[in-house]
Image (cartoon, coloured by chain):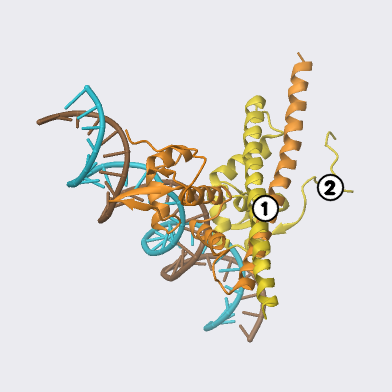
Chain colours: A orange, B yellow, C brown, D cyan
Amino acid sequence: MLQRARASPNEADSTDKERYSITQLAREFDITTRAIRFYEDRGLISPGRSGTTRIYTARDRVRLKLVLRGKRLGFSLKEIANILDMYAAERGETGQLQYMLDRLEEQRNHLVKQRDDIDLTLAELDVIESQCRQRLNAMVSSN
Amino acid sequence: MLQRARASPNEADSTDKERYSITQLAREFDITTRAIRFYEDRGLISPGRSGTTRIYTARDRVRLKLVLRGKRLGFSLKEIANILDMYAAERGETGQLQYMLDRLEEQRNHLVKQRDDIDLTLAELDVIESQCRQRLNAMVSSN
DNA sequence: TATTACGTTTACGTAAACGTCAAGCAATTA
DNA sequence: TAATTGCTTGACGTTTACGTAAACGTAATA
């Protein structure tokens, strides 16, 4: 039985040894394998292969996680691809550091605006809820 | 006159008098008239008519604003419709106050999670940016 | 050996959210 | 009066993000 030890104390290669199958990831993140393959088709993930079968590393898993976070924030896959590129380019020889700083600023502004929207909406939910509770109390006390 | 007092100094009719054309709103919010009509088609807005021409009140405008905010937060038009219904039902005779409180809670959880996502992303942007700036400094000092 | 589980590619289908004509009415302006 | 401007209602086209089915390979299990 050739099982690899997990949560290993030492790592020979500096690359993590965890590997995931497509269905493992699908189950973990509650998405379909179709979706994962689609993300690959759009260049968001590039898992290795064993024959034809996809094999996902810890890095692939992180990228998938970021993809899903981006989706929750309402970004399109294309936008998410750009963001992931920024993450990746961060240590590459881009030579366009200023351009990248601008893009970062842009991204930050977007997120801050979105957070403001959320805070506004949460505040309004508070108002609605308190009015709901008032009506609920009124119903109780009128019994 | 059993009217609730509103924030306005005088109001003859309790309905505001501002009217907007579809292109006015389109220009104000930088969307197309096609989009606005589409929102109407999906029941998100129901402007009055003068003949066949749509006439938008201040209330319609607010709803449109909420629609766009919802879109920025990544909600589908169907979800936005539900949210708007909650806003509207708030003073209606729903008789399902508890159900509505549950939906409010749900909505709140969604938003809080989204805000957490944003905070996570903003933190990571900080990291990337500082590394960018380090590289930029390195380039300058190596000249 | 047959079934089951898991994987693959290819390809057509679909819902959402509009974009983009087309054709026509109504009012103002040249 | 002719043209322009703004509005209307269809209706078909498009993009995104997958769903769904077909047809197949492989490996473990009953």
Vertical position of residue B33 compared to residue B71: above or below: below
Q: Residue furthest top?
A: A143
Residue at mark 2 to residue at mark 1: CA–CA distance: 51 Å
- The location of residue A138, given as percent across then percent down, is 78, 22
Q: Secondary structure at mark 2?
A: loop
Q: Which residue is disc 1 drawn over?
A: B123
Residue type beneath disc 1: Ala
Vertical position of residue B13 compared to residue D29: above or below: below
The answer to whether residue B48 is seen in the rendering is no
Disc assigned to residue B25: none
Q: Is residue B140 left or right of residue D25?
A: right
Q: Secondary structure at mark 1?
A: helix
Q: Which residue is disc 2 drawn over?
A: B12
The chain holding disc 1 is B
- The location of residue B11, given as percent across then percent down, is 84, 48
- The location of residue A33, given as percent across then percent down, is 38, 44
How many labels were placed on the picture? Answer: 2
Query: Which residue is drawn at the image coordinates 84% and 47% (left, top)?
Result: B12
Q: Closer to us: mark 2 or mark 1?
A: 1
The answer to whether residue A56 is seen in the rendering is yes
Q: Residues within 10 Å of mark 1 (few under 14, many from 20)?
A: few
Which quadrant would residue B18 be assigned to in this image? Answer: bottom right
Vertical position of residue B96 compared to residue A39: above or below: above
The chain holding disc 2 is B
